Image: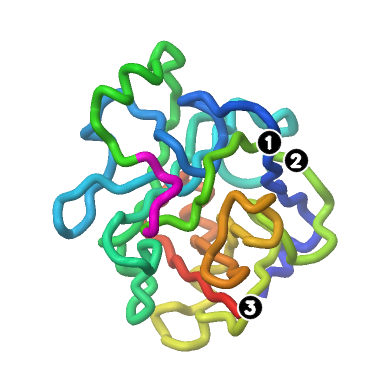
Amino acid sequence: MFSFLFDKKQYDLVCISEVPAITSSKFGGLPYCKSSEEVPVDEDGKKMQLLVQINFDEVKVPLSLGPKHGILQFFISTKGTSYGADFSNLLNKSGFRVIYHDAVDYSVTEAKVLSYGLPEGHGNSSTPVQTSCKLELVSVKQKDNKGSHIFGSPKFCQDDPRPLKPEYSSSKYDTLLLQIDSCATDNHVEFGDQGIAQFFINQKALKNLDFSDILYNWDCC
């Protein structure tokens, strides 16, 4: 199913002991944005909160897939306790969104973003992020499917959701864009009871940097 990725590198997300900046790769916190209008809203018109932000300008080893520069952001709704997932329709984007900024304006300050009154994506019941932390992307030869990483292959606490419905087909959502493993986040992120979350994308869409069609699911023990 993921054979075309087995011999390629994955990029582990490693928490490091530095305070994240607005443009940093990080779990939670305030998102990079040049205006509040760049932050997606949920079905109630409320601004979503940041789950993960990845700054590809910081990646030291060129990626075999996906963006070579810019910032990729994963947002979830503050509504409810399912962390933005719709388990009846894993393609429903009303509770989550993936946003790509192909260029980063490093003059944007934390004070400026704070002035927008956005929800901070940590330390509340509507997000799995307990505390925000800076992330470093480490290029590794794929060994197994454990841990938090981009690309590579997925690990499920229960079952792969893609065989459940024809519209979830693994032939369409054939690429793991992001996995967050609660066991590999130094207690910064907890999906349910040691759960794991995945965002899947089509490989062709990834090559085209089109993040409009994503399958998002998480499960736990």
In the rendered view, does 92 fall on the left or right side of 139? left
- The relative height of residue 128 versus residue 108 in the rendered view (above or below) is below
Disc 3 packing (10 Å; few <14; some 14–19; many ≥20): some
Q: Are marks 2 and 1 in contact (CB under 8 Å)?
A: yes
Q: Position of residue 211 (x, y in %)?
A: 41, 51
- The relative height of residue 176 versus residue 33 in the rendered view (above or below) is below
**Residue 134 on the magenta segment:** no
Asked where in the image residue 212 lies, by quadrant, the reply is bottom left
Q: Quadrant of the N terminus?
A: bottom right
Q: In front: 57, or 86?
A: 86
Q: Amino acid at mark 3?
A: Cys
Picture residue at 75% right of the left edge, 40% below the top:
138
Q: Amino acid at mark 1?
A: Glu
Picture residue at 40% right of the left edge, 29% below the top:
32
- Colour scheme in use: rainbow
Q: In front: 17, or 144?
A: 17
Q: Residue furthest top?
A: 107
The residue beneath circle 2 is 138
In the rendered view, does 35 fall on the left or right side of 129? left
Q: Position of residue 126 (x, y in %)?
A: 37, 58
Q: Position of residue 60 (x, y in %)?
A: 72, 28
The residue beneath circle 1 is 136
Q: In front: 151, or 129?
A: 129
The magenta stretch spans which residues? 120-125
For numbered disc 3, what is the local secondary structure? loop
Picture residue at 59% right of the left edge, 84% below the top:
159
For numbered disc 1, what is the local secondary structure? strand
Q: Are marks 3 and 2 in contact (CB under 8 Å)?
A: no
Q: Position of residue 122 (x, y in %)?
A: 44, 46
